[in-house]
Amino acid sequence: MSTMRYYRVEHCGRTYEFQFEYTYKLSEGYRAYIESTPSYGRRSQTLHATHRSKTGDRYYICWSKRIHSKKDMDTVTALWCKATVMYIVYGGKSMDIYADRLIRAG
């Protein structure tokens, strides 16, 4: 089972667009495979810095817990997209600081 999802983040007068394929497997829960994302430019693109994992030749959003519902996957994906944009714009060692700020801001 898979579903295509699209996200758009407006930040500092620019629009950043993302595309994902959500998949679900009973043994893994939901995953958001990254189909397209804005360029990281000169920022580090390591899996750790960008909170991505890889299987085969496909990247997906790295999350520490199994995601059990599409609604929860939407929440995680929206957070990842916002943190990615902030990382692209402002830099740093990784997206961690931006994800933490967004989570605390609620």
Image (spheres, rainbow, N blue to C red):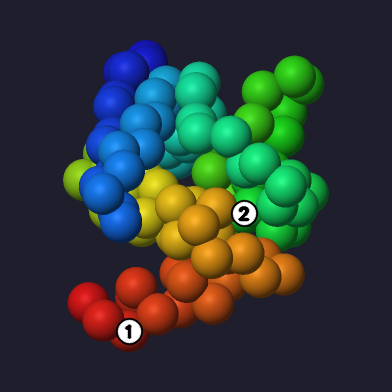
Coordinates of residue 55 in the picture (x, y in percent): 72, 28
Report the side of 53 relative to 11 (left or right).
right
Mark before the other along the chain sequence, 2 or 1: 2
In the depicted view, which residue is nearer to us: 94 or 60?
A: 94
Q: Which picture quadrant has residue 30?
A: top left
Q: Which picture quadrant has residue 96?
A: bottom right
In the depicted view, which residue is nearer to us: 47 or 24?
A: 47
In the depicted view, which residue is nearer to us: 40 or 67?
A: 40
Report the side of 41 relative to 24 (left or right).
right
Report the side of 74 relative to 77 (left or right).
left
> In percent of the image, x 62 and y 54: which residue is there?
51
Residue 75 got which mark?
none
Q: Tell me if residue 2 comes above or below residue 29 in the rendering.
A: above
Q: Residues within 10 Å of mark 1 (few under 14, many from 20)?
A: few
> In percent of the image, x 44 and y 52: which residue is there?
85
Coordinates of residue 26 in the picture (x, y in percent): 46, 33
Q: Tell me if residue 28 comes above or below residue 46 in the rendering.
A: above
Q: Which residue is mark 2?
A: 51
In the depicted view, which residue is nearer to us: 106 or 38?
A: 38
> In percent of the image, x 29 and y 27: which residue is there?
6
Identify which amino acid the numbered label 2 is placed on. Answer: His
Find numbered disc 1 in the image and state the secondary structure of the residue it sits on. helix
Q: CA distance from mark 2 to mark 1?
A: 18 Å
| Residue furthest out toward the front | 13
> In percent of the image, x 37 and y 55: which residue is there?
82
Identify which amino acid the numbered label 1 is placed on. Answer: Arg
State which quarter of the image contains the N terminus: top left
Q: Residues within 10 Å of mark 2 (few under 14, many from 20)?
A: many
Q: Which residue is mark 1?
A: 104
Q: Is residue 62 visible?
A: yes
Find numbered disc 2 in the image and state the secondary structure of the residue it sits on. loop
